[in-house]
Structure formats: C-alpha cells, structure tokens
Image (cartoon, helix red, strand yellow):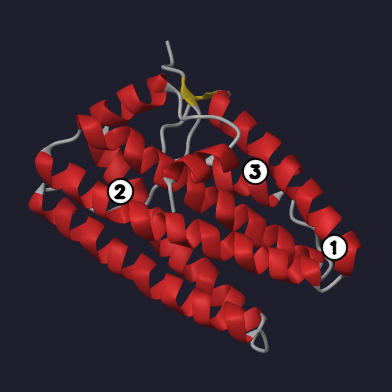
Amino acid sequence: MPLSELKQFLGCSTPKAWVELALQQQDILLIDHAHCEKKAASTAMQLMFRHPTRAGLLTKMSRLAKEELLHFDQVCRIMRKRGIVYDHLEASRYVGGLRKLVRTHEPAKLMDTLIVGAFVEARSCERFEALVPFLDAELAKFYSSLLKSEARHYQDYLQLAKQVAQESGAAGLSDYAQRITMIRELESELIESEDFQFRFHSGIPVIPV
C-alpha cells in the first residue's frame, strides 16, 4: 500500500519539532517504542479474547500480536546493544485520549476500538518514515523494515472496523464514516498541541523553563 494513502487517512503530519526532539532523546524514543509494541500485542490479544466468534478478527489479530511481539524483541535487542535499560515509562496522553471517544456498548465499542487501532498504527508508520532519513544506519534500516507491517496493521484494523459497520447496513456505514472523522480530529489535536512529555506518540514538545 502506498504510504500516501495512509498519510491521507491521518489529519496531519508529524511536527518537525517532534522529530528534532526524538533525535535528541533516542533513549526515551526506543524505550517508549518497546512499550508501544508490547501494548499493541496486548490490545490484539484482548480483542481475540473478547470476540472469540469473529473468525476474521481472530486471524488478523493473531498475526498482528505475533508481529508486535517480534518487534518488541527487536527493539529490546537494539537497546541492549546500545546500553539502554528497558524501564517503566509513564504512558503518554495519546492512546488514552483517543480511547475516551470509544463508546461503551457493542458493536459500537468494537468498531471504535478498531478505528482507534487504525489511527495508532498509521501514526506509528508515519513517524517511522519521518525519522528514517536522520537516524544512524542500524536504526534507519530497522525502522524502514517496520513500515510495511505497520501499514498493513492499519489496513487490518480499518478493514475489521468496516466489517463491523456493515453488519448494521447503511446506518452502520454512515456511523463508521462519522467516527473516523471524529477520531481523526482528536488525533490531529493530540499530535499538533503542545506536550510537556516526550513519547513516541506525543505532541509538539514544550521544554519546561
């Protein structure tokens, strides 16, 4: 899939200021990246347990969970080579902010969760690409290798969300389109607003005085 389609799905590009700070704080970038991969695998597993009768979801989420855990292991190996200790980090406001829009009743909850997953994967992919030209050879090669899988994960989440919407006919598809627009607006706001905390999905960095 061309990344242009993925970028069009997103409402904005990663601010240059975030890229500049990420290059200065690569230790935190890698630690938080590892946390993101582990959380992504956990989310996929949770969806599998909550929706055991959805065969398509089980297939896609099983594959996604395996890939995210592989990526987690790869990030940790790079960190060990660089003497970076994998440690606890306070979560960013990003995913928590997006999940505030997830409704509590089914099947709306599942559809919203899947759309949020699509935005998270799309943003991750867009940020990998933004960083690659400025990284050392090892990290640039690794992040470049992630682009294809992250783009596919975005597609998988969006495809599954659309399938859930289609179960409710035209009304479901209309709701699906509206939810994408709503979540896109919030996602862009989180990325383009000031953020005092640097993380893989944080907003425009503000350096405390």
> Which amino acid type is marked by label 3?
Gly
> Which amino acid type is marked by label 2?
Ile
Residue where numbered disc 3 is placed: 97
Q: Given the current orientation, which residue lies at the most extreme bottom position?
A: 53
At label 2, counting other C-alpha atoms closer than 10 Å, the crowd grade (few under 14, some 14-19, many 20 or more) is many
Q: Residue at x 87, y 70 (%)?
A: 168
- Find the distance from the CA under tag 3 to the CA under tag 2: 21 Å
Q: Is residue 191 left or right of residue 132?
A: right
Q: Quadrant of residue 46?
A: bottom right
Q: Is residue 195 left or right of residue 166?
A: left
Q: Position of residue 68 (x, y in %)?
A: 37, 66
> Which amino acid type is marked by label 1?
Gly
At label 1, counting other C-alpha atoms closer than 10 Å, the crowd grade (few under 14, some 14-19, many 20 or more) is some
Q: Earlier in the sequence, mark 3 or mark 1?
A: 3
At label 3, counting other C-alpha atoms closer than 10 Å, the crowd grade (few under 14, some 14-19, many 20 or more) is some
Does residue 90 appear in this view?
A: no
Who is closer to the viewer here, 82 or 143? 143
Q: Residue at x 35, y 27 (%)?
A: 19
Q: Residue at x 53, y 50 (%)?
A: 120
Asked if the residue at tag 2 contacts the one at tag 3, i.e. Cβ–Cβ closer than 8 Å, the answer is no
Q: Quadrant of residue 152?
A: bottom left
Residue where numbered disc 2 is placed: 31
Q: Which disc, if any, is residue 172?
A: 1
Q: Position of residue 40 (x, y in %)?
A: 47, 62
Q: Earlier in the sequence, mark 1 or mark 2?
A: 2
